[in-house]
Image (cartoon, rainbow, N blue to C red):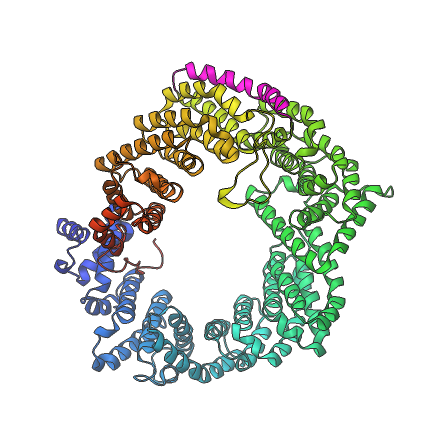
Amino acid sequence: MERREEQLGAAGAGAAPALDFTVENVEKALHQLYYDPNIENKNLAQKWLMQAQVSPQAWHFSWQLLQPDKVPEIQYFGASALHIKISRYWSDIPTDQYESLKAQLFTQITRFASGSKIVLTRLCVALASLALSMMPDAWPCAVADMVRLFQAEDSPVDGQGRCLALLELLTVLPEEFQTSRLPQYRKGLVRASLAVECGVVFPLLEQLLQQPSSPSCVRQKALKCFSSWVQLEVPLQDCEALIQAAFAALQDSELFDSSVEAIVNAISQPDAQRYVNTLLKLIPLVLGLQEQLRQAVQNGDMETSHGICRIAVALGENHSRALLDQVEHWQSFLALVNMIMFCTGIPGHYPVNETTSSLTLTFWYTLQDDILSFEAEKQAVYQQVYRPVYFQLVDVLLHKAQFPSDEEYGFWSSDEKEQFRIYRVDISDTLMYVYEMLGAELLSNLYDKLGRLLTSSEEPYSWQHTEALLYGFQSIAETIDVNYSDVVPGLIGLIPRISISNVQLADTVMFTIGALSEWLADHPVMINSVLPLVLHALGNPELSVSSVSTLKKICRECKYDLPPYAANIVAVSQDVLMKQVHKTSQCMWLMQALGFLLSALQVEEILKNLHSLISPYVQQLEKLAEETPNPSNKLAIVHILGLLSNLFTTLDVSHHEDDHEGPELRKLPVPQGPNPVVVVLQQVFQLIQKVLSKWLNDAQVVEAVCAIFEKSVKTLLDDFAPMVPQLCEMLGRMYSTIPQASALDLTRQLVHIFAHEPAHFPPIEALFLLVTSVTLTLFQQGPRDHPDIVDSFMQLLAQALKRKPDLFLCERLDVKAVFQCAVLALKFPEAPTVKASCGFFTELLPRCGEVESVGKVVQEDGRMLLTAVLEPPEHVDQGGPTATWFPICPSQP
């Protein structure tokens, strides 16, 4: 055993030539792989065995491992090694050995025909690989030879065993072709040869499927073989007899799954649409499954209904255009469409009672696209036929989107609830898409139904029905411009009449109001109808996401119409924030909503509201700044800083000029006086510095501090100017003490916005030189542990060159060192860092003429850059292709 461990250690050290790949050692390594409890030993054994499989000795030990006295795991490894040698090292095999190798494989396959099935499959894959390498010249009639050899009566194996072995071989042959490493020109030759061989395979499969005496296992294997061959893009008309046989086999429960797979694969081939006559013959076959489908649904047989639906959808989805073109057959295609509609509306709740309806959704997209792609006259005809179908589809989808009863939903697992949520999103997307076909009439249809439901006194309505109709409105309004719809005013009027007694219904009411926020901005008189509902919902933690996101949308879209409601909105928001009703992310959204809201007020009002809103947090931050750092007060500090930065992200009292867009965006000055955000930042600046002094070594706190200023700079642009000198000074102290990427990112923003302005250039230049000097020192100490800093530094340098190349004119800037550090960054394994470095050089190289120091460095060290670009990155194995997992055994005991 000591010697064995030494060998495995050698394998780990990469000493492959010295390894002793004998049968005995291979068997020991396999035993170690599967039965040694030590994971390191398993990994060593795995690595050694992978080397053994590709070694020259594999030709010797593979055959010995296939001996009858070996266990299947060992035999499987031997068969896998043979496949790897044939498929990957074919050129090593002398041509005079081809026939001998072929004969040996046939012998082994015949022997394993009545043995281990997993070993048989690997041997068949090996022979398939050999056949593909020899076809068409060295083995022109490979498939015919295979059939003839396995039909020989003098074989010791019984007829059924030989038949199953032949079918296994014929099944893996196309599969091996799809994954083979044949050169492209060889692939074309072999594909053509295989297409000819279909003439041998298909009659055999037809015979096996059609003769009554064929055992079920043989027929199932024949179906799988057919399924494999059709993926070689065999002409659909050549498959007609086998497709019909597969349809007949759908009545046999044992053959059902294999039949479905074969039919779907045959129908789904891209080339199949050329054979319209065959497709038309398939429609009656599919329609003939409707009774079997209804029985399966009635009996709760989900597998059968799922399979039949797959067949119907495969025909409709893949060939709707070709079938629509056959105008004289419009009724039969409409019958297929109605069959798919039945599958869409299959009874039961997805995914608990059924999993079929989701398969059909893409079909409705495809059919609609195909109808709308016709010329006007033909499109008008089909619109007349299919508009009623699509209105029916809307009813079906909204029924499927309904929640189950509260009691039933309570028993669903979290995974089932998540699947149902995703399913509803898919339905929502489909409804949005269907609007293109049905237009405004769809909204009227939904509104009429909702109106009748809410105003009817005859029978009590279920909340599920109401919720589904609202969900339909929401789905369309979220993405389609409904500002000109004449039913939205009525809908806004209906919403307050809804009796909300359920969280799911309340959520959908909120999201529907949010989806209509742009409409409310154009019709501000209606805001008061829905705003009280939103503010009331803010106090319910179960409605956190929907209520806060809806308020944010209203405050963003309708802010200039909200001043009359501002005091109430701020008061309710403050209350829920202080009571900690919402989770952190929703608190941040709420602060963004308040930022939008306050932006439309007068400066005096803004400052008054800011004082009321922020004072409790400032007091809490002052208290925390005095405490000794610990994990709990860190979370509180980061939370408060996050609230401030999210508020300042959207609090923007100036207006963008209409004729300026893009990165050069500038804003009109604020006429009322100093910017409120700047006023607040100046008031809390000393406090923030105090917090920093205790938390400077904590990246999360530093990042939160930088985020406040970075988001303020992005929002305020020129209005941030009064803060530039003191912020540059603070950033310099921060970065000199402990370099962090977030400080560089904020510096980049300052360079982007203020470096070109003469008044702000001195502090910007001083900060740029300082962070560059500190970062260059970091490079000298070893930058590999700080890829984030290197990434941000490269982005800063690129921004400096782009916005203010004068920063590179300063004598105190060591341009040569900067260049060399950027070359080093090119060799980092992290893709973002390499990309940032490339971005820097993209800005640097064109400036060789205008910046003398840059031109000099490129002249002197350009070869270094060229070498770095041409060298492979660190993380690429330079010794050859990445190691591939070779199959050793199909499963670990």
Say left or right for 71 vs 482. left
Give me the residue at 40% from left, 42% from top. 803
| Residue nearest the observer in this picture, 504 or 31 | 504
Instruction: Report if residue 620 lies within the magenta region.
Output: yes
**Residue range highlighted in magenta:** 602-629
Give me the residue at 70% from left, 51% from top. 398
- Residue closest to the far right: 458
Q: Is residue 671 above or below residue 382?
A: above
| Residue nearest the observer in this picture, 441 or 650 | 650
Q: Is residue 345 visible?
A: no
Query: Where is residue 237 drawn, in percent x and y?
Result: 55, 81
Query: Where is residue 347 drawn, in percent x and y?
Result: 69, 55
Query: Where is residue 662 drawn, in percent x and y?
Result: 51, 45
Q: Is residue 443 above or below residue 102?
A: above
Say left or right for 801 vs 606. left
| Residue nearest the observer in this picture, 272 or 81 | 272
Q: Is residue 273 above or below residue 725?
A: below
Location of residue 395 by image quarter: bottom right
Instruction: Report if residue 689 lies within the magenta region.
Output: no
Main SS of the magenta part reads helix
Q: Is residue 171 visible?
A: yes
Location of residue 657 by image quarter: top right
Q: How many marks?
A: 0
Query: Where is residue 880 drawn, in percent x and y?
Result: 24, 60
Say left or right for 782 vs 444. left
Say left or right for 581 vs 43. right
Q: Is residue 238 above or below residue 564?
A: below
